[in-house]
Amino acid sequence: MSHIYFTISCLDLCPPEMKFICLTLLIICGITDSRSEQYEVMGPADTVFALAGEDVILPCSVKPSISVVDMRVEWFRSDLKNSVVHLYEDHDDRNAEQTESYRGRTKLNHEELQRGNASLKLSSVQISDEGRYKCFIQSKSWYDDATVDLSVEAVGRPPVITVDGFDDTGGLHLQCESEGWNPEPVIEWLNSEGVSLSSETAETSRNTDGFRVKHSITVYHSVGKIHCRVKLRHHILETLIIASNKKFNPWRTSIILISAVVLLTVIAGMLIAAFFKKHRKLGQLNNENGIIKQEHEQLLKEKGKIQEECVSLQDEIDKIQQDYDECNKRIMQEHDQHLQSLANTQSKKEDKK
Ligand SMILES: *[C@@H]1O[C@H](CO)[C@@H](O)[C@H](O)[C@H]1NC(C)=O
């Protein structure tokens, strides 16, 4: 196939009148020339399996095993718009155009290229790596490619069981969910005897993180242990829930609910009463405060009056004090005079003697 393309493109360079001769010549010399460089690109017979997070080798080689060191080796995703996974050209890796998600995770062994082995090593495999790859090997005069299918297996997170409520007939709603799987796992409910119980609803969704599965079930007259098991080939993850073997009593639930409502009402009533009581007390206190203020003003007035009276009394006291001082002075003077006269009479008496 590739050889005919090569020939036809060369034919365009021929002058039109010589096309037939040219064609014959080219076919003859092309066949003899490319015989020496003819090869077949071989991929694996089966799908390659890889575990997410591990490394994988995508096999690809030429037959016969001639060196491909001087050739162009291109790995691309034929299922993803031929996006470039790895490119080897002009004796080196040329990964400027490489798809972002493969950056730093691809490796071509250059020594193996000499033996015609163009296998690609892909590190820490992701779920998004799953798909169809092409290994394309082109020499100056020949090309061929091989297809490699990669399947990625991812073990998800352990399932989580959620109790989703009770219904009127005493059934217990359970939900089991697990994510991060690839491909889609099998999920099932089992009772304590290991008997499979059929799920009521089943949901599956897929994103870049793999498959997410969610199943629900309703159990009646509980049966002790209920298991939720998620299985992918030989990987099994399981979670169990233990339900009490008492019958679910809807009455008990309603009694609990009613008591809760009654209790809440009582508490609310108490709070309201306390609020009003406080409010009333506050009013009273405000009233009392007014009265006390009035009394305080009256007392202030009276204090003023008393102060005035006090001042006038002080005046009177001063006057009295003055009177008293004058009186005292007079008495002292009289007293002195009296003493003098007494002394005079005494000295006269002694003179007589
Ligand atoms: C090809 O090369 C890879 C390493 O890139 C190696 O693992 C593999 O064994 C080689 N295949 C053969 C057939 O030698």
Image (cartoon, rainbow, N blue to C red):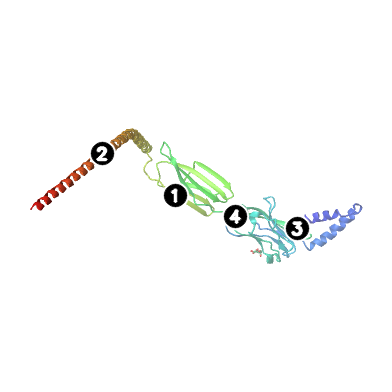
In this picture, is 126 found above or below 308? below
Seen from this angle, which residue lies furthest left? Answer: 353
Distance between the Cα atoms at labels 3 and 1? 57 Å
Mark 2: secondary structure? helix
Q: Which mark is residue 319?
A: 2
Residue receiving disc 3: 143
Give the labeled residue for mark 4. Answer: 126
The image quarter in which residue 276 lies: top left
- Identify which amino acid the numbered label 4 is placed on: Gln
Q: Is residue 331 above or below residue 68?
A: above
Please name whichever residue, 327 or 219, is drawn nearer the observer in this view of the structure. 327
Which amino acid, mark 1? Leu
Question: Answer yes or no: do the residues labelled 3 and 4 have beta carbons within 8 Å?
Answer: no
User: How many marks are shown on the rendered structure?
Assistant: 4
Residue receiving disc 1: 240
Q: Residue 332 or 79: which is nearer the viewer?
A: 332
Q: Position of residue 53 (x, y in %)?
A: 57, 57
